[in-house]
Amino acid sequence: MSATVTFKCPNCGAGLVFDAEKQSFSCEFCLSSFTEEELLGSDSERAAEAEARENEEFSAELNEYHCNSCGAEIIADRSTVADFCYYCHNPIVLADRVSGIQKPTKIIPFRFNKEEAKEIFLRYAKKKLFLPKDYFSPEQSDKITGVYYPFWVVDADTHANLTATGKRIRTWRAGNYRYTETSSFAVSRDGEIHFEDLSASAISTEDKAMLEGILPYQLNEHIDFSMPYLQGFIAKKRDIESDRLSAELRGKMAGYASTILSGTVRGYSAVVDKRTELTVKGSRWDYTLMPVWMLTYQRGGRTYTYAMNGSTGKIYGELPVSKPKLAILGSIAAAVIGALSFLIGWGVFL
Ligand SMILES: [Zn+2]
Ligand SMILES: [Zn+2]
């Protein structure tokens, strides 16, 4: 069961994970750990309780739907009626009880409305060859849906330290001898590095290729979340909590820090034994909704996804190829090749 009360790290602000073995809460982002007593009565506990209350208020304004055909879980505000599943186009049912849905802190609003999104899709589809006709029929293109996808967006203040051994090699000749001198230097670099807008998807299911296809978002365009932005749109329910991403994002930051600091180590023939230590001093985790215009098409048991970044307009499409149309082209090509060989044959006989 996912708890609605999640403790935040008093040191850096990331989500804490409970370690049953050590009976303590640990932060995989800044690598500190806390006992339950240390957290109870602390700011962290009060913040967790306030957040749980906010989530309940947020949930009260929402409908949650489950698709029994494909398993999609979506949320929409109460004024928005979702009667079909944006993904498999089957009818969907309202879940009986909505509770503890986490409230986003940031959102990037849609820049295109449904009519504009439809027009862009039709222009895109008409330029493509061999598409089945019903791919862009009015009935189909009308199913284009504005879906908010959940992401975690992280800012972090860190201190990074790089240690390494730098080698300088000098060779010279004297008489019949060749000398090589290797000098070793202890290299150390320190830096304060601020990371801004590191992002990771907050859903574990499908759509990876699609999301990669429409990224990036201009993250500086995100604004504080408020309910009206949801109106007329649906949102995918997030199922990855921030604590599950801590170790991965920490690894990414350490990698960037190592590259940045290594870039300042110059003048050696070789640099070996590189080691980077990263200390996270503070962080901010924003559960952020990002806009996608999405249209799927089912054919032969497969789902083809068309998606457009609702903010930048970047398009991703998996195209269904119509077999009869391809076959006609194939036979035309075969006929042309046949005619050519006939002409060549004729030339030789002359
Ligand atoms: Zn921490
Ligand atoms: Zn579905």
Image (cartoon, rainbow, N blue to C red):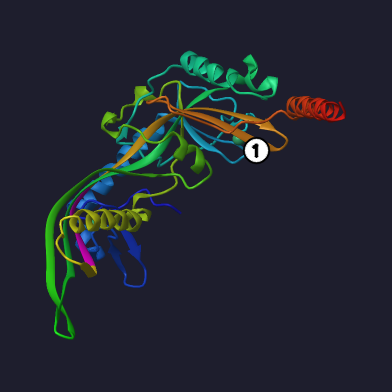
Q: Residue at x 69, y 24 (%)?
A: 132
Q: Nearer the viewer, residue 6 or 324?
A: 324
Left or right: 44 with respect to 19?
Answer: left
* Percent x, y of residue 323: 75, 30
* Percent x, y of residue 186: 12, 72
At label 1, which amino acid type do we have?
Answer: Ser
Q: Determine which quarter of the picture holds residue 69.
A: top right
Q: Residue at x 46, y 14 (%)?
A: 116
Dot 1 beta carbon under 8 Å from ligand 2: yes
* Percent x, y of residue 44: 21, 52
Left or right: 54 with respect to 37?
Answer: right
Q: Nearer the viewer, residue 4 or 219?
A: 219
Q: Main secondary structure of the magenta part?
A: strand
277 inside magenta stretch? yes
Residue reaching furthest right? 349
The answer to whether residue 140 is above or below residue 320 is above
Q: Which residues are magenta?
A: 275-283
- Which quadrant of the rendered structure holds the C terminus? top right
Q: Determine which quarter of the picture holds residue 337.
A: top right
2 inside magenta stretch? no
Left or right: 348 with respect to 239?
Answer: right
Does residue 280 appear anywhere in the picture? no
* Percent x, y of residue 203: 45, 44
Q: Secondary structure at mark 1?
A: loop
Q: Nearer the viewer, residue 254 or 94?
A: 254
Q: Determine which quarter of the picture holds residue 180.
A: bottom left
Q: Which residue position is annotated with label 1?
A: 69
Q: Nearer the viewer, residue 36 or 198?
A: 198
